[in-house]
Amino acid sequence: MLKTILSISGRPGLFKLVSQGKNMLIVESLADKKRVPAYAKDKVIFLGDIAIYTTETEVPLYEVLTSVKEKEQGRPIAQLPEDATQLRAYLAEVLPEFDRDRVYPSDIKKLLTWYNILIQAGFTEFAPEEKAEEGKTEEENATAE
């Protein structure tokens, strides 16, 4: 699901990829459903490509968002933490091993804001979709043996 959701530097909110042109993407705002172009000069980041640093490795964004969803019981975060200490304490609850030197309070605030935007837009599953055809093929192979 996060492979089609993106953030564009300099533009508020999140966008869903609708179509691709020669030198641009057509995206739709999750907030107001308006479609706008995103050009090659815009810094576009797909949420599916983001990971959060931990002390040992990196954790994909979908895992962190899923942990936040479990903590918030699928609801938006009512009161976003404001200061650095509160932001770090919140992330420590959902990802205790996050790297406190490389994950900045601004990153945490952006993550929590994204979570709220996604939940309010009706997105509740963050994990990548499994290809149904592959699963079916595996079942058929097991039956054939």
Image (cartoon, rainbow, N blue to C red):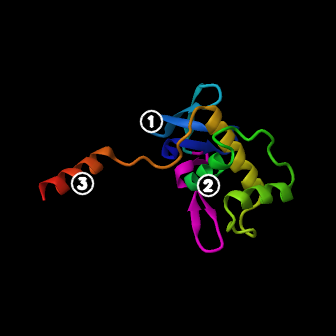
Amino acid type indicated by mark 1:
Gly
Helix, strand or loop status at disc 3? helix
Instruction: State whether residue 80 is above or below residue 103.
Output: above
Seen at 57% across and 55% down, the residue is: 63
Q: Residues within 10 Å of mark 3 (few under 14, many from 20)?
A: few
Three-letter amino acid code at the position of disc 2 = Val
For the C terminus, the quadrant is bottom left
Q: Which mark is residue 77?
A: none
Q: Position of residue 40 (x, y in %)?
A: 54, 44
Measure the C-alpha gap from mark 3 to mark 2: 29 Å
Residue 122 screen position, x and y as percent: 58, 32
Disc 2 is placed on an element classified as helix
Query: Which residue lies at the image location 56% right of the left edge and 37% below the top edge?
Result: 123
Q: Nearer the viewer, mark 3 or mark 1?
A: 3
Mark 1, residue position? 21
Q: Earlier in the sequence, mark 3 or mark 1?
A: 1
For residue 138, the mark is 3
Count of number-bearing discs: 3
Query: Residue at left 19%, top 56%?
Result: 142
**Location of residue 38 by image quarter:** top right
Image spot of residue 35 (x, y percent): 56, 27
Q: Which amino acid type is marked by label 3?
A: Glu
CB contact under 8 Å: marks 2 and 1: no
Judged left or right of residue 86, residue 107 is left
Indicate which label's residue lies in the foreground, 2 or 1: 2
Residue 57 is situated, as x and y percent measured from the top left of the image, at: 58, 71
Q: Residue at x 78, y 60 (%)?
A: 88
Which of pointers 3 and 2 lies earlier in the amino acid sequence?
Answer: 2
Q: Residues in magenta?
A: 41-60
User: Is disc 1 placed on a helix, strand or loop?
Assistant: loop
Q: Which residue is mark 2?
A: 64
Query: Is residue 55 inside the magenta stretch?
Result: yes
